[in-house]
Image (spheres, rainbow, N blue to C red):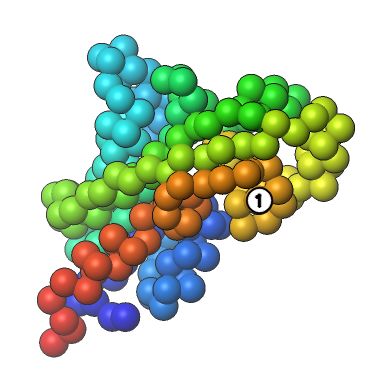
Amino acid sequence: MKHPSPIILASQSAARKALLGGAGLVFETCSADVDEGVIREKHLSRGDTPQKIAGVLAEAKALKVSAEYPDAYVIGADQILEFKGKIFEKPDNYDTARNHLKILRGQNHFLHSAISVVKNNQVLWSCVDQAKMSMHAFNDEFLDDYLKSADPEILKCVGCYQLEGLGAQLFEKIDGDYFVILGLPLLALLEFLRKLPPVQ
């Protein structure tokens, strides 16, 4: 899939890179240096929803990279985990991951995945989708075995799991798009990219 301007993913997420590459896109990556914590707290103080905050973060990342590469289509993305109205952040260590999973087990939570495409510092398109995740009521022994066996990359995931790996063992049901769970509303993005002008 070719486009008249380069595509840049404003992220170093291995999962997002794998999704775009697997879909046949040719792109580069560039980290977006934005203070996510400050942005998140600002909008939480305003009473904004997790969906809104995910969208704001995705847009901020894309705009940041677009300022440096204005001729590119820059893809910004973000994912937020919501549990009973509270936002969970990525765990700092295994102890935090264990505490998060103890809270989430036997319960439902939501993953809000947002994406924004920017060119010349203008937002061309954005999308926010969500998935409902229902965890098993697993015991402490199961949890400890999972944490010992899972890929250390789970510490880079808001939910402390990778659904494409051992994280699937944690769930009894999911309602939502698989790509949204992995952190990128891929099908909606591909539909947008197909509508771009063809290469001359």
In this rendered view, identify the residue nearer to me: 48 or 152.
48
Against 183, residue 50 (above or below) is above
145 with respect to 26 (left or right): right
What residue do we see at 49% from left, 25% from top? Answer: 83
Q: Residue at position x 75%, y 33% from top?
A: 138
Residue 3 appears in the rendering: yes
- Is disc 1 surrounded by few (<14), some (14 to 19) or many (20+) residues within 10 Å? some
What percent of the width, then of the height, locates residue 107?
Answer: 58, 28
Q: Residue at x 35, y 28 (%)?
A: 50
What's the residue type where badge 1 is placed? Answer: Ala
Can I make out residue 89 in this image? no
- In the rendered image, the quadrant that contains the C terminus is bottom left
User: Going by the image, does 113 lie left or right of 73?
Assistant: right
Name the quarter where the N terminus is drawn. bottom left
Residue 9, percent across and down?
38, 58
Residue 75 % position (x, y): 32, 55
Count the marks.
Answer: 1
100, above or below 171, in the image: above
Judged from this view, the residue extending furthest toward the bottom is 200
**Dividing the picture into quarters, in which one does residue 97 lie?**
top right
Left-right relation of 75 to 121: right
Q: Which image quadrant is residue 192 in?
A: bottom left
Q: Please name whichever residue, 58 or 169, is drawn nearer the observer in this view of the structure.
A: 169
Residue 73 placement (x, y as % from top left): 25, 62
Residue 6 vs 128, above or below: the answer is below
Q: Judge from the rendering whether residue 134 lies leftward or rightward of residue 23; answer left or right.
A: right
Q: Label 1's element?
A: helix
Q: Which residue is mark 1?
A: 168
